[in-house]
Amino acid sequence: MSINQLIFRNLKKNLKNYYLYVFALTFSVALYFSFVTLQYDPSMDEATGSIRGAAAVRAASILLVAIVAIFLFYANNLFIKRRSQEIGLFQLIGMTKNRIFSILSIENLMIYFGSLLLGTLLGFSISKLVTMTLFKIMEVDDVATLSFSFPAFLQTILVFAAIYAVIMLMNYWFIKRQSILSLFQVKSKTEGRVKNISVLEILMGILGIGLIATGYYVSSKLFEGDFTSMNTLFMVMIFILASVIIGTYFFYKGSVRFVANLIRKNKSGYLNINEVLSLSSIMFRMKSNAMLLTIITTISALAIGLLSLSYISYYSAEKTAEASTPADFTVVTEEAADELGQIFSENGIEYSEERIEVVIAEADITNIVGANLQEISLNDGITDIAFISEKAADMDIQETETLLTGYNDALQQLMSLEDSGDIVIHTANEKLEQQYIGLAEEDLLPIYFTGGFPTAVVDEKTFDIISNDIDEDIQRDSSLYIGLQLEEGENRAEADELFQNLAISEEYGNDSQYATERTQKQNMGLVMFIVGFLGLAFLITSGCVLYFKQMEESEEEQPNYTILRKLGYTRHDLLKGIQGKQVFNFGIPLLIGLLHSYFAVQSGWFFFGTELWTPMLLVMGVYTGLYSIFGLLSVLYYKKVIRESL
Amino acid sequence: MNILEAQKIHKSYGNKFTKQEVLKGIDLSIEKGEFVTIMGASGSGKTTLLNVLSTIDRVSHGTIKIEGKELTAQKEKQLAEFRKHHLGFIFQEYNLLNTLTVKENILLPLSISKVSKKAANEKFQAAAAELGIEDIEHKYPNEISGGQKQRTSAARAFIHEPSIIFADEPTGALDSKSASDLLDKMSSLNAKRQATIVMVSHDPVAASYSSRVVFIKDGSIYTQLNKGDQTRQTFLKDIIKTQGVLGGVHYEH
């Protein structure tokens, strides 16, 4: 058989084995290519309206290459180990190391560049879809065109060729370094000796669970006001990160074994088939995979967490916009209101107008703030509050009472306002003792007046007292809020355009809800898009890594299946055990990743938006679904191995 | 009473053009409580015969009955069910699961047939005592010696009191001391528990522990030797003599 035939046959055999590798590579290339195309796309700049968009995409593409490169190195490392026996055999029959290296290189070259071309083609065909998705998320009304970008193609080829060169170098080093004998032993060496559990491992196991729990606990306390300055807050965050990551590592290194061992001890040797296949096998492999699993878990958690946060922000864009500008349009001067109203009338846009008199006064809120005052930089407990009268708010308030309105999650987390208490209003010359009667949800004033703090609603008489005795220094330029609410929602875009064309749109205090919402959606949409695609790339590559691990494991365990089938277990029995095992193998990293991201999101989500559960669960659900596909694929592979075991 | 009856079993591999006949019509019956050794040179078909008898492999034609039950036409699932309850195995390469302790390995066959935990424990104690492996019950296979591994394997084969135990070169990987140790235990279990054992071996010493030796040559039964009342030593001499006749390549002049 000539060398060419040898290469060709190897290629055919390997293609069948490594279809997932080819898939992952093709997919990564496609993703990278469409990303780079986006970067070179002239319509991109117009759409995102700034250099920022292109820069973000470029940064993301670099990260993407990093993820893909690490995956390819790892996969290559696994594959060359699998083939070490073959390499040893070639040497045994007298082939030189250089010859073997060139065979491997040519073989890899074909698989690799085949996938590369396939990926570029796929990337070209999906690049329009990718751009459309981005435009859709950012709510940009632009039509993406399908055009082949030559610089993008060149960049893709160059980057992946560089990765290929590094892979070949690694292979070369591997072949050079190994003797024939060690090549034959590479496979058996990785199995690791089975030992009884040691005290150190038990300690590590308990420590792992303890560290994770501590991290979670501290993270839930992070913004509850137990940590004061920015510095301590930062230190605490580092502590949480370190504690959770080290805890995760110990968890895989010891806890899983420790817990499994407890269950096993309890059975006193009498294991059923599911336990034989799952418990004992997981116990002995988890330890050697600890590092890999920790990395996968941490990055999964990071991806899910970031995706959840950006989605929360995107999802809450509307509500956030409403909180900062309660009406469709906010203006703070009579002239601006007249000008805008005139333009609207000329264009046949119907609207209603609302005017509210606002005064700003200091108030002592020490008694109603649950948190420690120093932490929120409110040293004496006195803060500026925007006051309006009960009439403007369309409420009925007693003379001695004050109601706060404009609930906000972040604020509530930081200050934890109580349900009732005393509040003292400081006018310029006197102090009014008032009874605080609660916090209402509705936002009445724009952020221009409130500065993000709730608005105080007081009795007509109280309002008169305050407004007759004001401290000029703390008043805004205007003390009149005019809100223009459109009669028909579909006119918002048109009205916004008219507003943006006026000079008054540049003045501070005048604002459009529509524009605020759109800006938020565009910013968060871009972030979400990038994090989403990176997350997807990571998901697929890490899923593949776990799948390869399982592929290797199933082959190592094949003799066990033979024994079990001889003992009288059916294929069905074995498959059921394997399914249980895969639930753990894929489920543990997933579950821990989800938990990590849940606690991370939980600790600070209120800075990003107003809705936690729907966006977070959606992100987690999609991630879990995609991730499970790899678990299913591995079960199918096991099915094949079990079938061939007798 | 015959516990196993095989009639005219044929086994061939390959397709129509590359057909290779390994078993060429073997008739064999084994009585309850017998300890039978199948001997033959390598390539004679003895391992194939054992695989076929133990339902791991299927015959091309012929019938096999164990305890009066016809096995050749059964579905794979039924065969697995049958192995579960009626057969025990000891192999040359020990075939222990490396991820399980000695005790867990031994209790495996009981956990398939859903014996209660307490009964399982009692059976384990009894079998472990008979084979002398009580003090290693919590060790893993890579922490014990070859002889101990093979005794563990034997304990696993005996624990669920199967109708027949099949042993494929059980002493093949053992030193002579461990081998004779194991064979002693096996023949005492054979006597005490009335366990039927079918063993494949090419070692005359191992064969001399059994009550009957069946010689196979080129896929057919060549001859049989019964121990009868002879001592093990004289039986061994007989076996070696027969093996000598059997083993050589005959040149016809």
Image (tube, coloured by chain):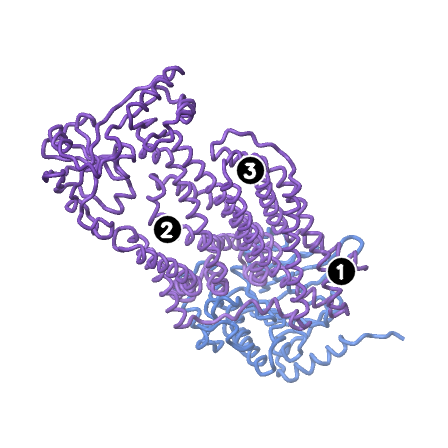
Chain colours: A purple, B blue
For residue A87, which numbered disc appears in the image? Answer: none
Q: Amino acid at mark 2?
A: Ala
Q: CA distance from mark 3 to mark 1?
A: 62 Å
Q: Which of marks 2 and 3 precedes in the sequence?
A: 3
Work out which residue is located at the far front of the displayed protein and give it.
A472
Quadrant of the image occupied by residue A406: top left
Residue A615 position within the rendered picture, expressed as x and y whole percent measured from the top left: 39, 40
* SS at badge 1: strand
Q: Amino acid at mark 1?
A: Glu
Badge 2: residue crowd in 10 Å (few <14, some 14–19, many ≥20): many
**Quadrant (top left/top right/bottom left/bottom right) for the C terminus of chain A:** bottom right
Q: Which residue is mark 2?
A: A600
Quadrant of the image occupied by residue A471: top left
For residue A130, which numbered disc appears in the image? Answer: 3
Name the one closer to the observer, A583 or B77. A583
Q: Which subunit holds the residue at mark 1?
A: B
- Can I make out residue B24 in this image? no
Name the one closer to the observer, B89 or A70. A70
Tell me: residue A502, above or below residue A435: above
Q: CA distance from mark 2 to mark 1?
A: 68 Å
Q: Which residue is mark 1?
A: B21
Badge 1: residue crowd in 10 Å (few <14, some 14–19, many ≥20): some
